[in-house]
Each structure stands twice: as structure tokens, then as C-alpha cells.
Image: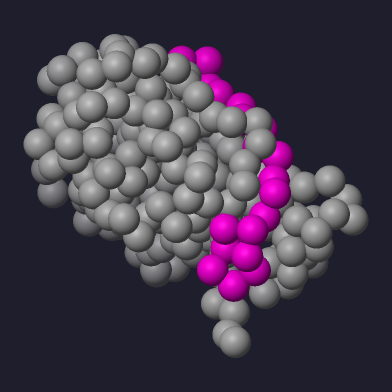
Amino acid sequence: MMAGMERHDLADFVRARREALRPSDVGLPAGARRRAPGLRREEVAALTGMSTDYYARLEQGRSPQPSEQMLTALARALRLTDDERDYLFRTAGRTAPDRASASSHVAAPLLRVLDRLDDSPALILSELGETLVANRMAVALFGDQSARTGLARSDAYRWFTDPGSRTVYPEDDRPRQSRALVANLRAAYGRSGPRSRAGGLVTALLDESPEFADLWASHEVARRFEDHKMLVHPELGPLDLDCQVLFTEDQTQALLVLTAPPRTPAWEKLQLLAVVGSQRFTG
């Protein structure tokens, strides 16, 4: 155990936050009547990807020191604010993430909205285009991008280094998407500076992509998301979708929601996507 870990404070805090939540707060059905307030331990364990036994020992003050990755998952599952997330890390004997550079902690207000979106593709992106969390409809449409690591977490990096990442957009719309990704990255770079994660991403892309270097030299700056998107699903074909975006106050995270007008071809395809979920279609 590292010095500074306060087992009982950590246990009391985690238990209190769990008991303060309701299933609907995290997108779960209420189910049968509950004998105790809040979420069940096994529900929090499932949301974080840890075993129920480990989580139980955490609440009992008997667990080993949680890793930073586990604390990040726990902060997300418990819908912690930035201040609560920092407290969680410090009572666990870990250094709280730098808020200016943290990318894995999802803003609680955006998560609360996402939890209530089940019939439309929705995902939360960092300012570097990293998918932080996505609902099942978004995973069915785009694949599970949240599982990626390193620079490949960024959609801008994948776009300019992996030609396969572009197939989700029609060919005639790809130049516009290239400009939008660079303008978004320029905005993040301007906020964080050359020594930030944004700066590291820019350096890598300047080395690896002549196309990116040409667009970077144009100095376009914008947090840009088109309000209308034509996307191409490998089995369903083209989907003509509306795109609505909700930003955090500091503009570092964005919730994207994709919808289609009722009874249109795209709406019908989304209904099929909802039924099948993330399963791949077969011929």
C-alpha cells in the first residue's frame, strides 16, 4: 500500500456515492423493489469492469490500492464531478489527474444525458476526438472506438494515418471532414499549447501525414461539427442523419447525438440498427 491511502475514508466515500445513485441515473432499469437505497454493489462492479468481490472489499476498507485506471472507471460509474473525482484519487493515495490534460474522466452532466439516450447513436468525445464513452447504437454504427489506446484513440490520428477509418464517410465528403478535424485539433492546441497532449498529437501527424501538414498550415480554427451528416454503414449503406452537439462549458468534451426524421429511410435503418445492436450484419 502506498503512503497516503486512506482506506476507511475511501470506503465511506465510495459507499455514500453508490447509495446516492438510482438505476435511472446510470441508464439501468429500476427492476424489482430494492431493500436498500442506491445501486447494488454488483451493478457498480459491472459498470467499472471489476469483480463484485473486489468492489465489496473496497467498500469494506479491505482492498489493495486501486490502480489509476480502476479509479477512473469508478469515477465514471459513480458519475462523480471533477472535485469528487479528485477526492477519490487522493483518498486512494493517487495523484489527481491534471484537469487541463485529463482525457478519460467524462463530464458528469454529459453522462447523465447519454444515459437517457437509447434509441439514437450518441457518444462523448474529448477535445482530441477520443471516444470516451458511447451507447450501444453508436457502437453499432461506428464500432467500439473507446477500446483503442495511444494516439489511435484520436479520430484525427486515425483519419490521417489509416485509410480504412475514412470509409464511414462518402468519398466526396472526406475533404470537408479532413478540414473539420484539423480545425478542431487547432482549437485544442490553442487552448493547451505545444507541450500538451494536443501538441504531441500535432507533432506526430506532421511527421506522418503530408495531407495533415498542408491543412495545418492553413491555420483554420474551430470546434466544428456539421449539423447534418451522411454516413455509410458497411451493411446498411448510407444514412442521412442530423447531428446535434452539446459541449461542456470549457469546450473540452462534446456529446454527439445522431437522429433521423421519423419514417424516413434513415430512420428505418436506425430502427434496424437498434434491434440488432452491435452485431454485424451478414449477407
Query: Is residue 77 depicted above or below 223 in this figure?
Result: below
Where is residue 135 shown, x and y percent of the image? Answer: 59, 54
Q: Residue at x 74, y 64 (%)?
A: 269
Q: Is residue 124 visible?
A: yes
Give the side of residue 90 with respect to residue 165, left or right. Answer: left
- Predominant SS along the magenta part: strand
- Residue sitting farthest toward the front: 172
Where is residue 128 shown, x and y percent of the image? Answer: 34, 33
Q: Is residue 8 visible?
A: no
Does 30 lie within the magenta span?
no
In which image quadrant can residue 165 be found?
Answer: bottom left
Boundaries of the magenta span = 232-250
Q: Nearer the viewer, residue 175 or 160?
A: 175
Q: Residue at x 30, y 49 (%)?
A: 158
Give the side of residue 125 with respect to residue 246, left or right. Answer: left
Where is residue 194 shown, x and y percent of the image? Answer: 15, 18
In which image quadrant can residue 91 be found?
Answer: top left
Q: Nearer the viewer, residue 130 or 55?
A: 130
